[in-house]
Image (cartoon, helix red, strand yellow):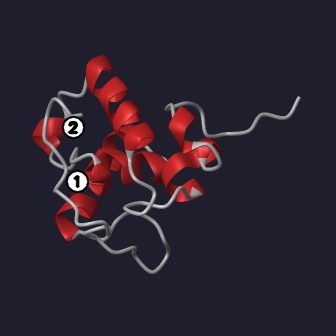
């Protein structure tokens, strides 16, 4: 499976990045800067969305600015197929699908109470 924009780095079974102290986004200064700039324009980006985009290689302004529905579907499929030894299924990555990553889809993160 390949992503249409930029493939993530090949892995030897472990995640190439490290978690930041607050378990926010994979630690990489250029990536954090891109997301900071994006948040200034569109508001808060959910933690799991930033993490998924980082794992899938969507970490430059040129790539992020051209994301379309096919890219979203490719990211979802990539995350469903991702080996859990590379990126364990946590809430910070899979959101509400942490217990069933094989069904991963992007969707609302907020729980609604009626």
The residue drawn where x is 53% and y is 57% is: 92
Q: Is residue 90 visible?
A: yes
- Which residue is at 20% across, 34% downward? 3
Q: Nearer the viewer, residue 37 or 63?
A: 63
**Labelled disc at residue 34:** 1
Any part of residue 45 in sight: no
In this rendering, position of residue 86 left or right of residue 102: left
Query: Dot 2, how many residues are within 10 Å of its Cα: few (below 14), some (14-19), or many (20+)?
Result: some
Left or right of 35 on screen, residue 44: right
Q: Quadrant of residue 69?
A: top left
Q: Which residue appears farthest toward the bottom when viewing the image?
A: 21
82 left or right of 16?
right
Measured Cα–Cα span from mark 2 to mark 1 = 9 Å
Question: Nearest the camera: 39 or 74?
Answer: 74
- Provide the residue designation for mark 2: 64
Front one among 94 and 1:
1
Given contact means CB atoms under 8 Å apart, are the residues at marks 2 and 1 in contact? yes
Task: Tell me the element at label 2.
Answer: helix
- Percent x, y of residue 53: 32, 46
State whether residue 29 is above or below residue 69. below
Residue 31 lies in what quarter of the image? bottom left
């Amino acid at each position: 499976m390949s992503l249409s924009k930029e493939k993530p780095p090949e892995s030897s079974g472990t995640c190439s990045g490290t978690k930041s102290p607050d378990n926010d986004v994979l630690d990489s200064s250029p990536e954090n800067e891109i997301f900071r700039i994006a948040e200034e324009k569109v508001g808060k980006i959910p933690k799991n969305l930033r993490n998924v985009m980082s794992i899938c290689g969507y970490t430059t302004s040129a790539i992020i600015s051209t994301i379309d529905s096919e890219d979203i579907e490719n990211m979802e499929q990539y995350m469903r197929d991702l080996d859990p030894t590379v990126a364990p299924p946590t809430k910070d990555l899979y959101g509400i699908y942490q217990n069933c990553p094989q069904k991963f889809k992007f969707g609302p993160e907020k729980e609604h109470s009626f």
